Structure formats: structure tokens, C-alpha cells
Image (cartoon, grey):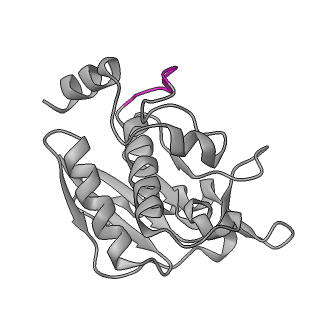
Amino acid sequence: MKILILKIGEVEDEVVRAICKGVEKTLPNTKCVIKVSVAPLPPEAFNRERGQYEASYILSWITLHRKEYAADRILGVTEADLYAKDLNFIFGQAQFSGKTCLISTHRLRPEFYGLRNNRELFTIRCIKEAVHELGHTFGLYHCRNPLCVMYFSNSIYDTDLKRAEFCERCKETITNILQ
């Protein structure tokens, strides 16, 4: 299983490399490849009133251009602040049982919440959200176990509580899918 990580807008290379390693460690039989060039943020995705980007536009853009990339899945990573219809913000979005997903690092930074820079915390949050959204592309639903990476993060506290790995039930499901 080949997963392409696509930087959308300026994203730190160090974070993208950490996401790649974390995804390979958590998802069995996967290989991540980082696209060297950076894709631009689609301007039509920006909502001036909110000062945020609508994730569905970016996800549609990735899907539209997916055939240009030789990969089984594409994970878009952006620094842009994302939202979805009827939600104030989101950490990421995926095509359920599809081929593309997207995460934002914007609200995963401790500094966003007025805290000191903490690279380790920031990096693990990015890995959790990447694995979570990729899990949706493989058909995994939200899990009821608050420690499972597939648990829904309604806030950064939920993200911090869950682990960067699947619970036993979700792990069995994903392992069967990726064999």
C-alpha cells in the first residue's frame, strides 16, 4: 500500500517526515512517499468572513488531481486553518472508503492555545490525525474507545487523550484490510 503525502501550501518538512514515519509504523504493509513539490491552496476554498479554508474544496481538489500521482492513498497536509459545513473548525477530513484525506496542522500546535512551543506534542498530534483520517479512507468509523486513534476528536483534549494507534478491534479490522 503506497501512501503519498502531499504538502498543500507551506508545511514544515520535519513534520511531514515525522507523519510519514508514524503512518508507516501504525498502518501495516504501508509505504509513505513525500511529494517534493508543494501544491498551492485552492483560492476558492478560502472564506474571507471566517478567515479559514473549507476542507471539502481542498479535498475535492486533491481528488480531482489524484490520477496525477501514483499512489493508493493521498494524504494532504496543510498549515491552513480548516472548517467544514456546520463546524467551527476541523483537524482533518477524509473521503470515507475513498482514496484521499486531509489534515491541518494549524490547531494542533500548542501555541494556538497560548502554550509554549512543544515539538514532541505537536508532532504526535499530527501523526494521530493523519492515521485517523487515513483510517476513514479504509472504511473505519469513529471508535467508542477514547484511547483509540479512531476516536472522534471534538477538541484538542480528545486528540491528546487518544493514542497514535488502533484499539484491538480497530487494529484487527485495519490489519485484515491491509493484508
Residue 106 lies in quadrant? bottom right
The residue sitting at 64% across, 67% down in the picture is 115
* Residue under the image location 69 percent in, 63 percent down: 113
For the residue pair 168 and 64, the one nearer the viewer reads as: 168
Q: Residue furthest front?
A: 116
Q: Above or below — where is 115 with respect to 141? A: below
Q: Which residues are magenta?
A: 139-145
133 over 177 or under it: above or below: below
Determine which quarter of the picture holds residue 62.
bottom left
Q: Position of residue 78 (x, y in %)?
A: 51, 68
> Residue 131 at what x, y percent from top left?
37, 45
Q: Can residue 150 be seen here?
A: yes
**In the rendered image of this protein, does residue 22 appear above or below residue 133?**
below
Does the rendering let one see residue 72? Answer: no
Q: Quick check: is 74 in the magenta stretch? A: no
Give the number of callouts: 0
| Residue 168 quadrant | top left
